[in-house]
Amino acid sequence: MFARVRGIVRSLVIYYGVPGRRRRELRLYREFLQPGDLAFDIGAHVGSRVRTWRRLGAKVIAVEPQPDCLSVLRLFFGRDRGVTIVPKAVGARPGRARLAVSTATPTVSSMSPEWIESVTTDRGFARVRWDRSVVVEVSTLDELVAVHGEPAFCKIDVEGFEADVLAGLTRPIRALSFEYVPSAHDAALVTLDKVERLGGYVYNYSRAETMRLASERWLDRADLVRRLEHVRPQGRSGDIYARLRRTDDERPA
């Protein structure tokens, strides 16, 4: 029990204790969310994005399968009528699945054995251990949309299971993000292909936890992949952002 508490405290320090983090999050997500918008947080963890999005006036569907993280979400947001907590994972089809949990570092708990195998070659994951597992309920993005409505923005941060999450979505949504880990580069490209098949997106990239879009203009898929190949040797993870193309978007040369 002590190890589990210590793991959650570590996450709280990372996501709530870094000076300036909330200010950077507010600045970034104003690009995607307006008051009254609906946002999906797939892999809500301990709710740092939920807090920021509520500050922006958005309603939030916080989806999280880890029992310890759910306890934190209910403590922080259980009385907030603007937040709906969904105690499930999200995947390609509804059902049940096994989640590999890292007690010491719950932020990297994953439902993808392939992703876990890939990142074990990364020095940043050298001390990470997935030491237990839990069986969790699984929904799909299509089901969440049917129940709660179509989101203006959907954050997907599920440690290598992003492509499976997007496999359960059959129509484009306005904007989304998913995590990029250099040691799992190929998995990110598979996820990107899932987004491309939904149609009509342009892309940007945020390094690590800077909460700042790296490119001054939105990119097509080819330009984004070139950017990722450039940052890949640096070994720094980040987030890929996608939004539906607008008529005023400048097409990259």
Image: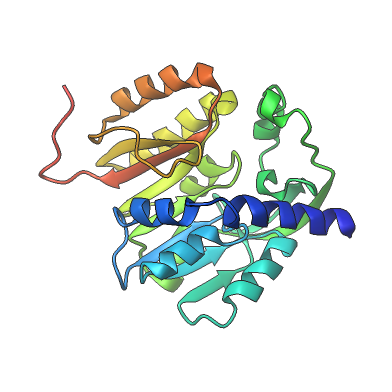
Location of the N terminus (image quadrant): bottom right
The location of residue 10, given as percent across then percent down, is 72, 51
Q: In which quarter of the image is the C terminus?
A: top left
Is 76 located above or below residue 166 in the figure?
A: below
Determine the image quadrant of residue 120. top right
Q: Is residue 53 visible?
A: yes
Q: In this view, does 21 lie to the left or right of 33?
A: right
**Above or below: residue 229 compared with residue 189:** above
**Residue in the foreground of this view, choosing between 147 and 38:** 38
Query: Residue pushed farthest front?
Result: 19
How is this picture coloured?
rainbow
- Left or right: where 164 falls relative to 88: left
At x 42%, y 45%, the residue is 211
Q: Is residue 26 left or right of residue 93?
A: left
Q: Residue at x 62, y 69 (%)?
A: 73
In which quadrant of the rendered view does residue 160 lie?
top right
User: Residue placed at 67% from the left, 29% from the top?
Assistant: 124
The mark total stands at 0
Between 197 and 202, the one lying in front of the other is 202
Q: Where is residue 129 in the image (x, y as percent from the top left)?
A: 80, 38
Instruction: Locate residue 5 relative to residue 226 in the image: left or right.
Output: right
Residue 184 rendering spot, x and y as whole percentages:
58, 27
Q: Where is residue 231 in the image (x, y as percent from the top left)?
A: 45, 21
Above or below 11: residue 215? above
Towards the viewer: 241 or 199: 241
In the rendered image, the residue lying farthest to the right is 1
Q: Residue at x 86, y 53 (%)?
A: 3
Give the vertical position of 172 relative to 113 (above or below).
below
Q: Can residue 168 be seen? A: no
